[in-house]
Amino acid sequence: MSYVVNMVMGGGSSINPNKAVIRVLAPTGSTITFSKNGVVAKTLSPSRGFPNSADNTLSYWYCSIDSSAYGTFDVSATVAGATETASVTVGGAYQYEVYIDFA
């Protein structure tokens, strides 16, 4: 099961405010894949995840999106041979939240 929530991104020195950011919350150890129109745009390894301090079975991954690439992305998490996917439509320089749950 997966959930997508859109929220406005706050300012910060490490994230470019002119780009959108997709933040993915998925089980720790997942490989995260971002696809657009059936083409893989980016893959993030398990080592790129940041463990959730409240629940170390979950981690966060971040992907910035340039305005020229806005559109609908399929975000997949793969862990222990299982894959779950959620879709998110990026249309502005905001932070987009994707929660991927294997329940």
Image (tube, grey):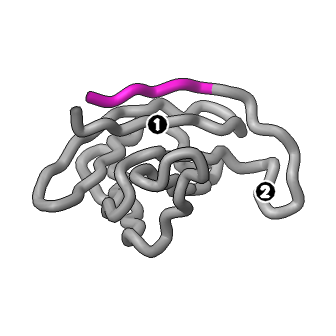
The residue positioned 66% from the left and 38% from the top of the image is 95
Q: Is residue 103 left or right of residue 88?
A: left
Residue drawn at 13 percent across, 51 percent down: 82
Residue at x 56%, y 56% (from the top left corner): 62
Q: Give the amino acid type for the residue marked by disc 1 in the picture.
A: Val
User: Given the image, on which type of amino acid does mark 2 rest?
Assistant: Asn
**Residue 4 belongs to magenta span:** yes
Q: Which residues are magenta?
A: 1-6
Labels 1 & 2 near each other (Cβ < 8 A): no
Q: Locate the C terminus by quadrant.
A: top left
Question: SS of the residue at dot 1?
Answer: strand
- Disc 2 target residue: 16
Residue 34 vs 102, above or below: the answer is below
Name the residue carrying label 1. Answer: 98
Dividing the picture into quadrants, the one containing residue 79 is bottom left
Q: Choose between 77 and 67: the one closer to the eye.
A: 77
